[in-house]
Structures are given as structure tokens and as C-alpha cells.
Amino acid sequence: MKRIIARVWKLIRGPLQWRVLWFAHAKFMIGVTGVVRNEAGEVLLLKHRMWPADRPWGFPTGYAIKSEEFPNTIVREVREETGLEVVPGRLVQVTSGYKLRVEIAYEALHVGGTLKLDSFEILEAEWFSPDALPEGMQESHIQLIKAGTAT
């Protein structure tokens, strides 16, 4: 049976193989988070309107759009949510195991822009010292801060 499957697979080379693979595998959304810091080492945290009321504080985050490079996702999301400009840095984490998404986190450095919140999504934006974080933060985002301060 395996030989037959291998033979058929070789016969359907190209676009048909990709279509079979696409139907046979899970589909994921890619969530991208920006661990945004300023030159003083403070982190940019947003109070998100749509997040749970007991954990509204966290980093800028959003979903990648089709054909978007993931570092550019965080540049776009920070600009949309805050009006600020950032330069993406190194990849700091990739997390899978969610039902329909993969989470990716990049470092990012604040380089300019004027704070102008997207009031539909964001209630507040503030710079915090990694040692003085607000109550109600996402635990995964606290871990990203701790991982970054250890380096």
C-alpha cells in the first residue's frame, strides 16, 4: 500500500500535491506580538478593550495578514494601535499548541511617532519599567519581559 501511495504522490507533482497537503493539514492564524522597548529599556504596554477585564494589559499584538512578513506585522500593528513607529528586532518566541493559531513574538525598538490610540481597541498606552508592571497583565507577556531582561 505504501508503494502505491508513493507512486501516486510522484505522479501528481506540483500544484496538485500542494492542494492535497493544504486539505490534509491544519490551518492556522498567526498572532504576532511586539515586545516594544524604548531607549530607556521601558516596555510599551497597552490596555486592550477586547481582552478579559482582569487581564487587559499587554503588548501590542495582532494577526498577520496574507503574504505579510511577520516582523512587518508588528510594525503595522503598533502603528495602527498607537501611532508609534518601531523597528522590529530578533524573534524571541514561537508558541504552538493552540487550536487554530501560532503565536510569534519579536523584539521591537520605539523609534518615533506621536501617540494616537485606536480607541476602538486600546484604552490606554504607557511605558513601564520591567520592574514595575501594572496589575492585570497577560502572564505570557510577563514571561516575555522576564526572558528579555535576563539577556
Image (cartoon, helix red, strand yellow):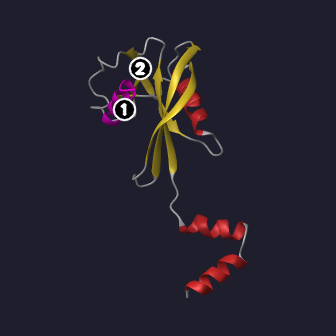
Image disc number at residue 43? 2
Q: Which amino acid does label 1 sit on?
A: His
- Above or below for 10 versus 99: below
Q: Read off the magenta span.
A: 138-151
Give the percent coordinates (x, y) of residue 29. 51, 49
For label 1, the residue is 141
SS state under label 1: helix
Q: Quadrant of the C terminus?
A: top left
SS state under label 2: strand
Is 111 left or right of 59, judged from the image as shown? right
Q: Is residue 142 magenta?
A: yes
Give the percent coordinates (x, y) of residue 147. 36, 31
Query: Rounded to the nearest whole Å, what is the CA distance between mark 1 and mark 2?
Result: 11 Å
- Could you tell me what secondary structure mostly forms the magenta stretch? helix
Residue at left offset 33%, top offset 33%: 143
- Above or below for 114 versus 91: above
Give the percent coordinates (x, y) of residue 31. 49, 42
Q: Is residue 104 magenta?
A: no
Q: 76 or 21: nearer the eye?
A: 21
